Image (cartoon, rainbow, N blue to C red):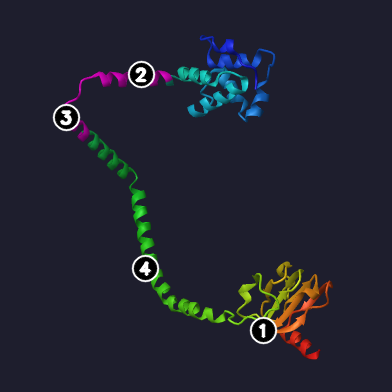
Amino acid sequence: MAEEFTDLQMNPEMTAGEMLRAARTTGRRKREIQTISKQLCIREEFLQALEDGDYTVLPETVYILGFARNYAMELGVDPDLIVAKIKRELGILKLAEAMVSHEKQEQSKPAVPVVAEKVEKKSVVGEKKSKTLAYVKKHWTWFVGGALAFVVVLIALVLILPSADEDMPTRMVVQVSAPQQVMTVEPKYSLEVREKFGTENAGKAEIVIQAVKESWVKIEDARGKTVFSRVLVPGDVYYVPAGNKHKGTFGNAGAIEVWVNNELVGKIGDDNVRKTGVVLDAEKLAKKKSDK
């Protein structure tokens, strides 16, 4: 930020634009409007308008004051002083001061009789009612459109609700039959179960694997899409999805025990041996046990 221009700020005869231009073009650090425009992300013509005092170029009062404050801070000029000067140049402070003066005069007047106050309130209410009626007359199409839309929504709800009631018995049957799929009998695992994975398959799973040692396991479906992949630690259990189209990859084949229909059929392979493409078919895995 530029050095502060205390002497310039204290000159009451300078306009806000003159102070900004002097701060930018004098001193040890002269700067171009183009450079400051890029730094503040404010258009060059807006900064030039602030220096020229041509506030008609800027969009609204709130932008004028905001841009002026940021410009002053960048140039090291007191932003409150710049904003106050611009407000006076725009007549904003004069209006505010006049309103304050008017309020003080009103407060100094004697109290208005209650009857007059009631009459004033009635006139204000009547004025509000007349404005409301005028607004309704002017925009009557909006109100009619809103009413029609409300009627259409009500009709749609009436037509939809009976069909929703007819579908209710079907949903209730599904909710009642769902618990029958949950597996109630678990295999007698070699280790105490630490954590279960693939529990959404538990109701239909014919094959369950348990890690007796640490091993990385990946299960893929018939399309080669991975449905499960993680490192199982001793005690972890995974329920293999039903069907005979899944294959497994095991980082340590001797660390994984296989259970088919709650019966232990053995391990995937030898210790510290990686096996890929293992077909997880319940019938084939059970047959391997009987062949041993």
Specify the label residue 63 is tagged with: none
Spatial CA distance of label 2 from label 4 is: 61 Å
Q: Mark 3 = which residue?
A: 114
Residue 209 x, y percent position in the rendering: 71, 77
What residue do we see at 63% from left, 80% from top? 186
Spatial CA distance of label 3 from label 4 is: 55 Å
Mark toward the start of the polypeptide (1 vs 4): 4
Majority SS type along the magenta span: helix
Left or right, residue 224 beside residue 198: right
Indicate the secondary structure of the residue bearing disc 1.
Answer: loop
Amino acid bearing label 1: Asn
Q: Mark 4 = which residue?
A: 158
Quarter placement of the C terminus: bottom right
Spatial CA distance of label 3 from label 2 is: 28 Å
Mark toward the start of the polypeptide (3 vs 1): 3
Spatial CA distance of label 1 from label 2 is: 92 Å
Mark 3 and mark 2 in contact? Answer it, CB < 8 Å: no
Closer mark to the observer between disc 3 and disc 1: 1
Mark 2 and mark 4 in contact? Answer it, CB < 8 Å: no
Q: Mark 2 = which residue?
A: 98
Specify the label residue 262 is tagged with: 1
